[in-house]
Structure formats: structure tokens, C-alpha cells
Image (tube, helix red, strand yellow):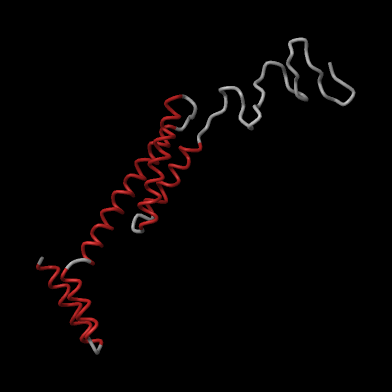
Amino acid sequence: MTSTHGHQEPTGHGQQLGYGEPAGHDQPTGHGQPAGAGERRNGFGIAALVLGIVGVLLFWTALGGIVLGLLAVIFGVLGFRRGRRGVATNGTMAVIGAVLGALALVVSSVLLAMGVAVINSDEFKSYQDCIEQANSQSERQDCARDFDREVDER
């Protein structure tokens, strides 16, 4: 039955229907989430894929490779678990995002470790001392050649 304000009145079953809404459909809860199982929650899978792609593209930076890669792995695992429970429909996307994130994380970590090893090496300290004492461009170039030769001999 419709009231004078255009809203439908409660039915005899104790359920009030919204304007133009057929009986028997899930009503939203107070938190904006539907009460039924029809809603798919694909946010983690999408976030994992986006973060994984950006992490792979920026693997050469600590923020891009390590931070974004780690976030992609976390969101990918959460998205995959939602897919396994049937709450999300993009479990494969979440797995791809997690794999890309893991790849970015590993490559970036290896590059960071290599960079730290080079900076802490005796050859690099020797190079820094040489550059500090160099007075001309040709002396700086000699320092660079000596550094290259020491690294190659290692």
C-alpha cells in the first residue's frame, strides 16, 4: 500500500519496503554494506595489482620497490583469501599483484644491499679520499679510473 507521500507502507510481514523496491531484496545495513552475500569486495585485489605494477616500475627506489612491493604482497594475500572465501571475484588479480609486489621487493632489496656493500667497501672509501684531495678535473678522472680498476680486480 502506498501512502500520500509516495512511500510504500509496511507489509503484513513486518518488512518496510523502500520507494520502488520489490519485496524480498536485501536491505542495506546501517554501515552502508548490504546485508546479502551479493556484494563483492574486490578492493584488496585491485590495490595489490596497482601497487605491484607501480612497485615493479619503481623497483630501483626504496619507496617503490620495498614499500610498495610489501604493500602489494599484503593486499594480494588478503585479496586472495577473500577470493577463496567467495567474498571477492578477483583472486587471480590479487595473486598477480602479490607476485609482482614480491618481485619488486626482492629486486629492490638486492639492489639496496649491493649499494650498501659498495658504499661500505674499502675501494669506495679510497675513492672518496682521492676525490677530496683532487684539485682538478683530470685528477678526479684518475680517481674514477683507479676506483673502476680496483672494483674490477675484486
Q: Residue furthest bottom?
A: 135
| Image location of residue 69, percent across then percent down | 37, 48
Q: Up-down: is 52 above or below 132?
A: above
Q: Residue at the location (90% across, 23% down)? A: 4
Q: Up-down: is 24 above or below 67?
A: above
Q: Quadrant of residue 142?
A: bottom left
Judge from the rendering whether residue 143 lies leftward or rightward of residue 29; answer left or right. left
Q: Up-down: is 65 above or below 46?
A: below
Q: Residue furthest left?
A: 153
Q: In this view of the protein, which residue sits in the foreground, 62 or 54?
A: 62
Q: Quadrant of the C terminus?
A: bottom left
| Image location of residue 134, percent across then percent down | 22, 86
Q: Quadrant of residue 63?
A: bottom left
Q: Residue at the location (56% across, 22% down)? A: 37
| Image location of residue 36, percent across then percent down | 59, 22
Q: Quadrant of the N terminus?
A: top right
Q: Residue furthest right?
A: 4
Q: Residue at the location (29% across, 49% down)? A: 106
Judge from the rendering whether residue 46 lies leftward or rightward of residue 17; answer left or right. left
